[in-house]
Structure formats: C-alpha cells, structure tokens
Image: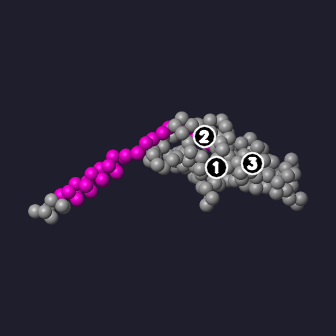
Amino acid sequence: MKKLMIRVIALSLAAFMLMAVMCGCGGKSMKIKVGVKLGQDYIDFKYAEAKSKGDEDFIIPADERTILDNLEVTINYDEDDPVTALRALRDACENNSIDFTMNSAGRVEKIRTYTTLSYTPDANNPIEGYDEPLSFIWAFTVNGEEPAGRVNTYEVKEGDVLVFTLSAGTEEAE
C-alpha cells in the first residue's frame, strides 16, 4: 500500500509539472512591425555596375525595392528568452516565404536575392562614379533611430517598428 501511495504521489507531481510547462508559464506574444527595403545608394550602384558591363536594360522592379512594407508580425516567446531584432526579421521572412540567410557571426547576409557586398575599384573594369572601396550591408533602425546594438543582440519591444535596409555602411553598423 505504501508503494502504491508513493507511485500516486510521484505521478501526480509529474502530471502537475507537465501541466505547468504546457500551460505556457511565461509564454507571451508581442506585435511589432518589420520593413525590409533596398537603399537608393544600393540601387544606384547596381545600375552603374550593370551599365559598366554594357547591360543598359538592367532594372530592379519597383515591387522588389520594398520587400516588406512595415508588416505587423506577432512573435511568441518565453519571458526568459528575449526577442532580438534578428529573430523578428527571421520570423517575418519565414512567415512570408522570403529567403533569408545569415552568417555564423549572426549578421544578415541575404534577403531574397539581395546580398551584402564589398566593392573595390578595378582599373580594368571601372564603374563610373565609384572610385573608392564600398560595402553594402543590411543595416537596421528601430522606430526611425539607429540602435545601440547589433541585430543579433538588440532586444525589441512591443510596438517597435524595425526597418532593414541594404545600403552603404560598415560592419560596425550591423
């Protein structure tokens, strides 16, 4: 009888713990907006690059320049697992079937077919108007301001508006 009582108590405790986990203790959700776009400086560079290769017909369609237009995204998370800007971007892209790649350092590398790139002038293949080295990165703003943090560490809050832009910048800006 004593063994039966111990089993009943052990099973009851296990069931209680399982229910506590499944009830989502600490499970929350937040709504934020996510925008993804190509910067005008990137678009201008790609046109100049195409022109330097003799491709006068190159075009980035207008509907490709804004990939996500401040789309409202609901993110489910645990209280002790903060939501980063990178997580918000990843969720927004996955929910909209948009190809998204990041590198091992947690930096955004590619959204759709638009990748970060570095340009070094080449005397044999010059691009008119681009005489200095240049890098294009996926930079981001939060509520219109550049945040003090990286995309993989900056914690977003309810109601934030994140905008990711492929534009000229430096690695420190990510």
The answer for how far apart the CA atoms under marks 3 and 2 are is 18 Å
Residue under label 3: 169
Asked whether, in this view, residue 118 is left or right of residue 109, the answer is right
Q: Residue at x 88, y 60 (%)?
A: 124
Tell me how far mark 1 sits from mark 3, CA to CA. 14 Å
For label 1, the residue is 150
Residue drawn at 68 percent across, 41 percent down: 146
Q: Is residue 17 magenta?
A: yes
Q: Residues within 10 Å of mark 2 (few under 14, many from 20)?
A: many
Most foreground residue, 74 or 8: 8
Say which residue label 2 marks.
162
Q: Are marks 2 and 1 in contact (CB under 8 Å)?
A: no
The answer to whether residue 12 is seen in the rendering is yes
Measured as percent of width and height from the top left, residue 42 is found at: 74, 46
* Residue 93 appears in the figure: no
Q: Pick whichever of labels 3 and 2 is earlier in the sequence.
A: 2
The amino acid beneath tag 2 is: Leu
The colour mode here is one colour
Q: Relative to 97, is 7 on the left or the right?
A: left
Question: Does the magenta run of residues contain 151?
Answer: no
Residue at the location (71% across, 53% down)?
171
Amino acid, disc 3: Gly
Find residue 75 and report its horizontal and vertical position in percent.
48, 43
Q: Name the residue nearer the viewer: 121 or 137.
A: 137
Residue extending farthest right: 123
Q: Are marks 3 and 2 in contact (CB under 8 Å)?
A: no
